[in-house]
């Protein structure tokens, strides 16, 4: 177990390095970071200005601009080569300094602290929706495999899988909010209950397509498991069908779902970009869109790192979950 | 149809009449079981013997209501006066697993890999007999002890993968016996375990059966397994019982050439070293649209023209020595058929006959 944990930790660190280095390089080579900080001042030819006549009053302004540029260079270490800058950035990160946004000089840590809870609530609710829908759905479909309900759910799940997030979101908004007025159409943060309630539609938008894919996986695995001898044995023991389903067949059939659950976390964060836009949720998803557009790379990098961390940690938990699902994994 | 002279109850515990099982498949309908009838009395053992594809396992699964939904079943199965198929259809609780239960062929796969052994045994006790978790686990430990499991206290909290095949089969047996069933169906219970363990397990089953006065259906492809453990033997071929009798009669005075061939195919300890094994020629019969003839005829050394003309009926009454053969071995007709085939060098079905087909084993 200890070895397992250590291996995971090493993996986490390696993934973080790879992801942040790639992100860092991309941000640096695709745009000029200096331009993002000081704007057009970055175009000034400061060496020429410095070399110019000291008496020329028209150069005073330019000189002060050049000082600003030099200051920015120093603050963001822009006078150093990219690998060195990366290492300096890593050093800051390790000491808990996430840097400040180019946009408004707000500390990145503060931005994340502000926006993360919304996104977390959304993601957790969406996964609850997806599993809460997929498990009963998959069980019933597998129990009556190839019957009317199962065939119907095949169609329904392919439908859900092929509709893009934004389209599903709009349909749900129209039906459940505008037409039947069950859920609010936009983000509310007055109270916790109101917040959770306003997150239901976004969570459905994000969770239902996942539920459809989980349902397909669970159904297939369950059908296979139900043909196992130990299920026959359970039937010969006289246990009722649903008890066999939940106590014997479900657990060994969860592997694919759990695996995809882990992997889909990444995709889900991607999906939350769109969903947060549609429902006006001030979360990480919206923040990263803005930050990317404005080349606000301390913010982008911090979010990228956060996502990578989450991804690795969730998949680590998935691995731990395997050994709960099947004791034979523990023996290995 | 008075069966035995002494103790047998007048009403059989299990009575099967004209059981048919068909499976619709893309290639056609598989006629897996074609009119099987037998009686089993309280405390007795019936061995059902046959090759793979003979319908013996399907028969067992039909009794336990374990067939896939697509199976077409007809016929009567009566357990202590109750219609078993009706019980199954209405989902009657506490019948399967309590009155009648089953042990499967492969202990490696018939235990749930993700549940502790003790829990799997206790589960039945909790569901059927309403035991508390603690009581049930305690009883599970006692059951494990009863089936000769070493260190039962430790085993209850182990997982199946931590046990050997032989030990797992003991767990399966303990699980089956938990609710003191009156009828145990053992479907090739020792086929998948080491030869050295086979005899232990069979003797154990026999002992437990006797102690508990339980009836047993022992399904096997090995007549040797049935020998000494079964009161009655039914030999199945192509979904039909081709010969059935009490064990003694069947082993010393069999009538069906298939029974004879099965017995001859068992290697014997007193055979000379490097003695050629005596396999049954040919392959098991086709079950999709079988010809209207004796299914064994293509492999039978006694086959005559009349064997290819209609399926021979099982003679006699249920409970007596019955066989479905027109030229039974050990009779004059059989002898004449064998002699004629030997002279011709080939049977009517085209099977070459060389050497000695053997009159009586």
Image (cartoon, coloured by chain):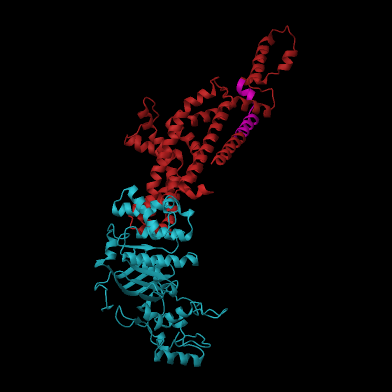
Judged left or right of residue A45, residue B312 is: left
Q: Residue at x 54, y 28 (%)?
A: A291
Q: Quadrant of the C terminus of chain B?
A: bottom left
Q: Position of residue B160 (x, y in %)?
A: 46, 54
Q: Can residue A146 be seen from the camera position used here?
A: no
Q: Position of residue A302 (x, y in %)?
A: 56, 29
Judged left or right of residue A320, residue B293 is: left
Mostly what secondary structure, the magenta segment? helix
Q: Residue at x 52, y 80 (%)?
A: B271
**Image height check: is A228 above or below A126?**
below
| Magenta extent | A19-37
Q: Can residue A177 be seen from the camera position used here?
A: yes
Front residue of this view, candidates A272 and A178:
A272
Q: Colour of chain A?
A: red
**Image height check: is B210 above or below B154?**
below
Q: Colour of chain B?
A: cyan
Q: Position of residue B46 (x, y in %)?
A: 35, 72
Instruction: Please tell me in which quadrant of the rendered image residue A120 appears.
Output: top left
Q: Quadrant of the N terminus of chain B?
A: bottom left
Front residue of this view, candidates A85 and A147:
A85
Magenta span contains residue A26: yes
């Amino acid at each position: 177990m200890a070895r397992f944990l250590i291996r995971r930790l090493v993996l986490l660190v390696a993934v973080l390095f790879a992801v942040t280095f790639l992100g860092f390089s991309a941000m640096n080579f695709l745009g000029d970071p200096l331009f993002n900080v000081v704007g057009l001042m970055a175009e000034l030819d400061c060496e020429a200005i410095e070399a110019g006549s000291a008496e020329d009053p028209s150069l005073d302004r330019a000189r002060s601009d050049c000082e600003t540029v030099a200051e920015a260079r120093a603050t963001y270490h822009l006078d150093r080569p990219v690998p060195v800058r990366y290492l300096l950035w890593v050093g800051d990160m390790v000491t808990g300094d996430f840097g400040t946004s180019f946009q408004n000089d707000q500390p990145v840590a503060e931005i994340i602290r502000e926006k993360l809870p919304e996104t977390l609530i959304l993601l957790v609710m969406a996964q609850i929706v997806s599993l809460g829908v997929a498990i009963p759905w998959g069980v019933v479909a597998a129990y009556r495999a190839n019957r009317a309900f199962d065939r119907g759910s095949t169609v329904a799940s392919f439908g859900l899988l092929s509709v893009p997030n934004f389209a599903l979101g709009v349909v749900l908004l129209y039906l459940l909010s505008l037409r039947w007025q069950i859920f609010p159409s936009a983000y509310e943060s007055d109270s916790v209950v109101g917040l959770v309630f306003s997150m239901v539609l976004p969570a459905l938008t994000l969770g239902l397509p996942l539920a459809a894919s989980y349902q397909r996986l669970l159904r297939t695995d369950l059908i296979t498991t139900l043909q196992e001898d130990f299920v026959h044995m359970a039937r010969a023991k006289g246990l009722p069908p649903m008890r066999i389903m939940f106590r014997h067949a479900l657990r060994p059939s969860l592997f694919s779902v759990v695996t995809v659950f882990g992997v889909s976390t990444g995709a889900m964060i991607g999906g939350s970009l769109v969903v947060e836009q549609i429902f006006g949720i001030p979360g990480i998803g919206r923040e990263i869109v803005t930050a990317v557009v404005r080349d606000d790379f301390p913010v982008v990098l911090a979010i990228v790192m956060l996502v990578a961390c989450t991804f690795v940690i969730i998949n680590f938990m998935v691995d731990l979950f395997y050994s709960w699902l099947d004791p034979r994994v523990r023996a290995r | 149809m008075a069966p035995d002279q002494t103790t047998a109850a007048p009403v059989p515990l299990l009575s099967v009449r004209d059981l048919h099982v068909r499976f619709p498949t893309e290639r056609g309908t598989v006629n897996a079981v074609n009119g099987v009838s037998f009686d089993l009395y309280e405390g007795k053992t019936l061995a059902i013997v046959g090759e793979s594809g003979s319908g013996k396992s399907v028969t067992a699964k039909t009794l336990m209501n374990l067939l896939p939904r697509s199976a077409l079943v007809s016929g009567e199965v009566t357990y202590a006066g109750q219609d078993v198929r009706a019980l199954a259809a209405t989902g009657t609780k506490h019948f399967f697993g309590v009155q009648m239960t089953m042990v499967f062929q492969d202990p490696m796969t018939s235990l749930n890999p993700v549940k502790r052994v003790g829990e799997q045994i206790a589960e039945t006790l909790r569901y059927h007999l309403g035991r508390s978790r603690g009581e049930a686990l305690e009883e599970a430990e006692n059951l494990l002890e009863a089936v000769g499991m070493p260190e039962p206290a430790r085993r209850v909290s182990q997982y199946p993968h931590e046990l050997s095949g032989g030990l797992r089969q003991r767990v399966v047996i303990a699980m089956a016996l938990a609710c003191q069933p009156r009828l145990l169906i053992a479907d090739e219970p020792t086929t998948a375990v080491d030869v050295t363990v086979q005899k232990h397990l069979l003797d154990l089953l026999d002992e437990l059966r006797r102690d508990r006065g339980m009836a047993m259906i022992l399904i096997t492809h090995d007549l040797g397994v049935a020998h000494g453990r079964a009161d009655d033997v039914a030999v199945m071929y192509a979904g039909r019982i081709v010969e059935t009798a009490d064990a003694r009669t069947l082993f010393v005075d069999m009538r069906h050439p298939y029974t004879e061939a099965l017995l001859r195919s068992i290697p014997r300890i007193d055979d000379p070293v490097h003695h050629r094994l005596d396999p049954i020629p040919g392959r098991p019969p086709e079950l999709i649209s079988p010809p209207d003839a004796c299914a064994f005829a293509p492999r039978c050394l006694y086959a005559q023209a009349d064997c290819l003309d209609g399926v021979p009926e099982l003679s006699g009454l249920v409970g007596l020595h019955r066989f479905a053969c027109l030229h039974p071995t050990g009779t004059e007709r059989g002898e004449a058929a064998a002699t004629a085939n030997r002279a011709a060098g080939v049977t009517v079905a085209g099977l070459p006959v060389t050497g000695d087909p053997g009159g009586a084993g």
